[in-house]
Amino acid sequence: MTDVRAQNMSVSLGGKALIEDVSFCLKRGEFVALLGPNGAGKTTALRALLGLEKLRTGEASLAGTKVGALSPLQRARQVAYLPQARPLAWPNRVKDIVALGRFSHGAAMGKLKGTDLAAVESAIAACDITHLSDRNAETLSGGELARVHCARAMAAQAPFLIADEPVAALDPRHQFRVMDLMSAYVKDGGGALVVLHDVALAAHYADRLIFMKDGRIKSSGTPLQVLSSKSLAEIYGVRADVKGRSVVIHGIL
Amino acid sequence: MTSDRGLIAGLSLACTAALIAACLLGSTPMGLPRVLAAIAGQGPAGDSLVIWQIRLPRALAAFMVGGALGVSGAALQGLLRNPLAEPGVLGVSSAAVLGATLSLYYGLTAISPWALPIASIIGALIATAIIALAAIRTQSVVTLILIGVGLSSFAGAAMSLLMNFAPNPFSLSDMVNWMLGSVSNRSYREIGFAAPFMAVGFAVLYGARRGLSALTLGEEAASGLGLNLKVQRISIVLGAGLATGAAVSIAGAIGFVGIVAPHIVRPFVGHDPARSLLPSALLAGLFLVIADIGVRLLPTQSELKLGVVAAIFGAPAFIWIALQRGRRHD
């Protein structure tokens, strides 16, 4: 049972349900995109899966073990998490930021050796930021920074990756570059759960799409199974043409 | 790592040199041979009294106070992810001073010599906890610093009240000394009562240093990395409260040294909050030892207070750091 599993998770905040009865699973070697309008509860679902939200009902488990029973470090060695907000407090060097990905393995910034060093170097090479590795992260462009954060998440060499809008605010080329990185990670045997707003991009890359709305899962399946003009109208309230994996959105309904 | 070692070795050497210089220099001029003889226990009894009982404890007090404030500043900056955080600015020092003054005012110090350090540590812990609780609710550093201003003002008002009611001029001047910050006439006794708390505070902060690196990425990503945020916050609050409270119990309020030292250190340790802890402590200790030598040597009518000197240099540095930051952020 090497999978990440959410079973009937519900989370409430101040009496208001943020997510309700959310169940899904993520296997290794699988690319799953989590989609839905703003406020659908996608981020809450990710956080609940990581054990960062208090569950009202249900449970989240990692390879058969309840997330709550794992220490934060044990959990982090299983799942790398790339949150939506990615602030940097200090003007650190790129390779020191990537090195933080080894935190759960006990490595310290700037004092890497052995497997930690190898993991950081291979993540830096995989994300094509070798030429930036000694740069001050504050001097990077948005696209470069996005790759640095990907490298940080991948340096953990965790079997699973959860990313919250990793391509937000990137130009099309950089969106594809970041998605290619995630895709390569999945080909190497990782399982990725990625929140996306771009339905076309999700359809292009993901093996499976999960649509959420109003805190609940509306549909889940391969792009061919779940994508249709009707389903996009119901979930987003938009007019869309769907042909196979290609999605074109024309406007609002 | 090697550059870190070099930095720490260099700073340790400078601190040792400054401590020796502090023993050499003073209002009674004594040459190196006389000082060495006194240290070795030879020479006139008066010399060895001046060195061992007056100059050395005073210099050690300045060093320890600086070290405690430097490490607290560096740790709080790492936790709050802001270069302007510091025990003085956040109102932690003034709260500790209030605690110390209360224990003096109510004569608790007569009951036990531990009363003063414990009272100032309690004051510091209350203030640090308020700041840390506020930091959970708001990410705005302006808000945190305003809360610090509020805490300082409250502590200041309470101090004024105590001064109003001071039973005699002696206790009044005692309180003023405490507010201004000074290490004059400190003995091993006062140092000894504060040292255990400082050591524990330092150990707690040092033990939590890796989490400070993780917080570079923000709290959400740090918890994703496997950091237990709650434990991290409690450790920094506890460590900084213990260290600052103990520092205040020796010297009263000495501000800004906890901002300036980490700010200078940071570029040399790759802006890693974890690696900035020890060098910040050493540099802040060095600053206060040198500043205290200056205070003793300046031919002023009544001796300047160390806290006043620290603020005269530190406050402009604080404003400068804030302006630099304003250009990059917000």
Image: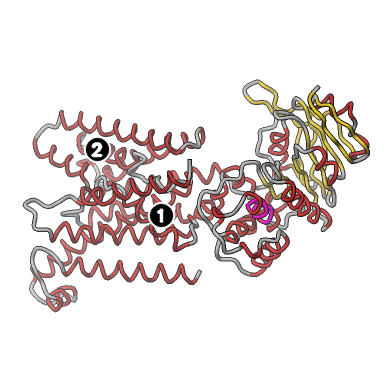
Is residue A150 a member of the stretch shown in magenta?
A: yes
Left of A4 or right of it: where is B293?
Answer: left
Say which residue label 1 marks. B202
Q: Position of residue A248 (x, y in %)?
A: 85, 35
Of the two numbered discs 1 and 2 in the rendering, the one whose residue sits closer to the viewer: 1
Give the magenta part as a residue range. A145-151
Q: Which mark is residue A238?
A: none
Is residue B320 a member of the stretch shown in magenta?
A: no
Residue A210 vs A73, above or below: the answer is: above
Marks counted in the figure total: 2
Left of A60 or right of it: where is B18?
Answer: left
Residue B268 in view of the camera: yes
* Nearer-the-camera pick, A201 or A86: A201
Subunit under mark 1: B
Looking at the rendered structure, the kind of residue marked 2 is Ser
Q: Quadrant of residue B10?
A: bottom left
- Residue sitting at 26 percent across and 55 percent down? B191
Q: Position of residue B95 (x, y in %)?
A: 31, 38
Subunit under mark 2: B
Residues packed near mark 1 inside 10 Å, few (<14), some (14 to 19) or many (20 plus): many
Left of A123 or right of it: where is B180?
Answer: left
Left of A110 or right of it: where is A242?
Answer: right
- Residue sitting at 46 percent across and 56 percent down? B206
Residue B323 vs A24, above or below: the answer is: below
Q: Position of residue A171 (x, y in %)?
A: 70, 46
Looking at the rendered structure, the kind of residue marked 1 is Phe
- Residue sitting at 40 percent across and 46 percent down? B84
* Nearer-the-camera pick, B144 or B208: B144
Between the residue at mark 1 and the residue at mark 2, the CA separation in whole angstroms equals: 24 Å
Residues packed near mark 2 inside 10 Å, few (<14), some (14 to 19) or many (20 plus): some
Say which residue label 2 marks. B103
